[in-house]
Image (cartoon, rainbow, N blue to C red):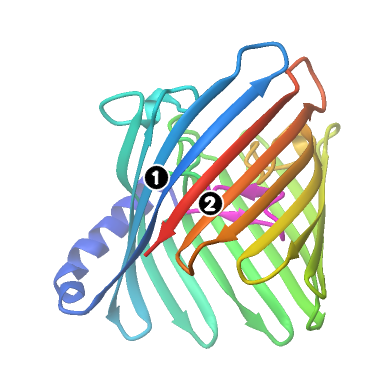
Amino acid sequence: MKKRLLAAAVAAMITLSTGLALANPVELDGSVSYRYRVDHNQNSEDHNAGITRFTLNAKSEIAPQLSIYARFAAEGVSNNNFTAAKDYNDSDNFLGEIDQYGFDYTNKGFEYKIGQQAAWIGGTGLLYDSTGYLGQQDFGVVDGINIKGKSGVTSLDFLAAQENNSTGDDNKIYALRGSYNPTSALTLGATYATYRKDDAQNFWAVDAAYTMGKATYSAEYAKSNADADNSAYDVGVAYKFDNKNTVSVTNYKVETNGNINAMTTFDSNRKGFYYSADHNFTKDTALHLLYRDMSVVKGAADDNTSFRATVSYNF
């Protein structure tokens, strides 16, 4: 379905359902955060910014097992070093809009999410991950359907969607991941995906996660049918000291054609390490520290590092 037709259909259905939705309770939740970020490039000046984010999620049941959902997202940046001006409203430093909306239906253990939403493909998001983006433009969301559920011992995650971007290109994504737990501590998964833009590009990935004591080990390997630069991997460990403190380290390498449209959780055409530490002040308030040490896989781009300190509150 063309994304403009999907958007029009969803908007019409939401409009028709408004009266019924208002008669039912509306569930609200969200988050507010402040991030200080410093990027250091090997052969150029450093960039830093303060980034404030706010999200508000609304959900209301309009029929048994059927709900409508929407998200309002806003972001303010102290300078535009880390923003694309075309994404922002009124100035280069602010964004505020409803960027996710649609329908959520559950039946017999399966959830069907239809509409504008974020996408995650693979066990670790190695192939595709737009969950950290705000706004409708430039791949912050996709338009389509995501189906999740369990058949026997296998958990299934299916996505059929089209990227919502400012270029107007019809970039379609189809993906299916299956996973199961041989033991309570071990998860094994496999993913197949197709990305259709000018030509179809096919991907497959395998992933695993194993928990032993306070440590969880995870890894994913991906490959595409491109002729060159067609693989990616990440391997990491997270250690949970207690309910308040967790640290992790991840090594990765993502070649240009080893992920979908440079939307990996990590960094396309980069390799290096992610180091993170999380501290929960309360069940709703947390501090997240992230240090990324990266070098280019192929080409003349600068090696760089990025430090991010984020305080967040969930409500």
Considering only vertical position in the picture, is 38 above or below 118? above
User: What's under tag 2, amino acid-wise?
Assistant: Thr
128 left or right, relative to 139: right
| Residue lying at 48% horizontally and 49% vertically, measured from the top left | 311
Out of 281 and 60, give the one closest to the viewer: 281
Rendered-image quadrant of the C terminus: bottom left
For the stretch drawn in magenta, what is the main secondary structure? loop
36 left or right, relative to 234: left
Considering only vertical position in the picture, is 5 above or below 68? above
Q: Which secondary structure, mark 2?
A: loop
User: What's under tag 1, amino acid-wise?
Assistant: Arg
Check disc 1 and report the residue beneath it. 53
The part of the chain drawn in magenta is 118-132
* Residue 7 in the image, given as x and y percentages of width and height: 34, 51
Q: CA distance from mark 1 to mark 2?
A: 14 Å
First in sequence: mark 1 or mark 2? 1
Q: Badge 1: few (under 14), some or many (20 or more) residues near its Cα, within 10 Å?
A: some
Residue 290, image quadrant: top right
* Residue 58 in the image, given as x and y percentages of width and height: 31, 65
Out of 209 and 191, give the one closest to the viewer: 209
* Residue 74 in the image, given as x and y percentages of width and height: 34, 43
| Residue lying at 76% horizontally and 49% vertically, measured from the top left | 203
| Residue lying at 82% horizontally and 38% vertically, measured from the top left | 230
Residue 131 image label:
2
Considering only vertical position in the picture, is 248 above or below 199? below
Q: Which secondary structure, mark 1?
A: strand
| Residue lying at 72% horizontally and 67% vertically, measured from the top left | 241
